[in-house]
Amino acid sequence: MNIANNILKHSLKNVYFLVGTACSGKTTMANALSKKYGFIHFSRNKYENEKSYKVWQSIINEKYQPNSTKREDMDWEKYYSRSAEEFLADENDKNASDEYLDFAIIELIKLSQNNKVTADIRILDFNLVTDISDYNRIACLLAPGELIVRDNYARDDHRDRVERIQSLKDPEKKFETQYELMRIRAKEMAEQAHKHNLFTIMRTEESTVKDTLRLLEKHFDL
């Protein structure tokens, strides 16, 4: 069964979507908005939303979520030995995100019936997010590639990934491939945000939570 996007849009009218790159402040700002205004913060990050993450992990199966279940038996040496071009050509990661998005949208609809919700979930399809929400309910937070390269693997919630790569052969080369991907994807996401005329905030070395929150409040008309 496919639910028309206009129906989803009606059902998600109380949701504020924060999309964008890694290390751009999505989770920080979702937390700040939720704390200040009493919103519910919904995140895919298992560290931020452990209960929801456990539910998702408990219901996925090979028939309905083949790309998500593949990660359970992943050959990580083979996975991380690929070139940047091979990573970019692989649709499995995108498809796994799409599989999760079905679950996330249902959760957002449930949570937002009587509450406002901030959602920092991984939405790669900006055509979709602009179709299921209004301009003043979407903010795209971006970070330049070099800043992402510097900060991404220093995050506590990425410690498992760092340790996994470090356990493989020639980890330095594998990290360099990941850094190349970060730069490419940061550029692509900024281009897509511009193409879809999304409200964007680019993180810089001078960015502060206070200033970014003020910009979001103005955009969201809070």
Image (cartoon, rainbow, N blue to C red):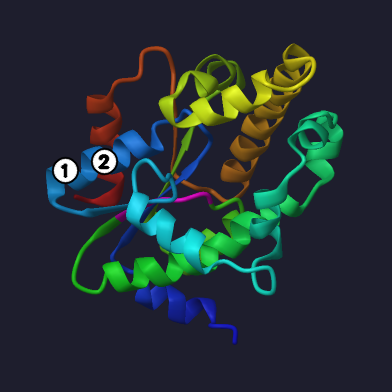
Magenta-highlighted residues:
118-122
Residue 205, quarter of picture: top left
Question: Taking 85 as reference, is 111 left or right?
Answer: left
Crowding around mark 2 (Cα neighbors within 10 Å: few <14, some 14 to 19, many 20+) is many
| Farthest residue, direction bottom | 1
Q: Residue 120 or 201: which is nearer the viewer?
A: 120
Q: Position of residue 192 (x, y in %)?
A: 63, 44
Q: Residue 204 or 28: which is nearer the viewer?
A: 28
Task: Residue at 60% x, 55% y: name it.
Answer: 97
Q: Position of residue 30 (x, y in %)?
A: 30, 43
Amino acid type assigned to the residue bearing label 2 in the image: Asn
User: Which residue is the site of mark 2?
Assistant: 31
Does the residue at mark 2 contact the one at mark 1 (Cβ under 8 Å)?
Answer: yes
Task: Residue at 39% x, 38% y: name it.
Answer: 26
Residue 222 visible in the current orientation: yes
Asked if 144 appears above or below 127 in the picture, the reply is above
User: Mark 2 and mark 1: span between their CA atoms?
Assistant: 6 Å
User: Secondary structure under badge 2?
Assistant: helix
Question: Taking 209 as reference, is 38 left or right?
Answer: left
Q: Position of residue 207 (x, y in %)?
A: 35, 19
User: Is 177 within the magenta?
Assistant: no
Question: Taking 123 as reference, is 172 left or right?
Answer: right
Residue 183, quarter of picture: top right
User: Which residue is the site of mark 1?
Assistant: 35
Q: Position of residue 135 (x, y in %)?
A: 42, 57
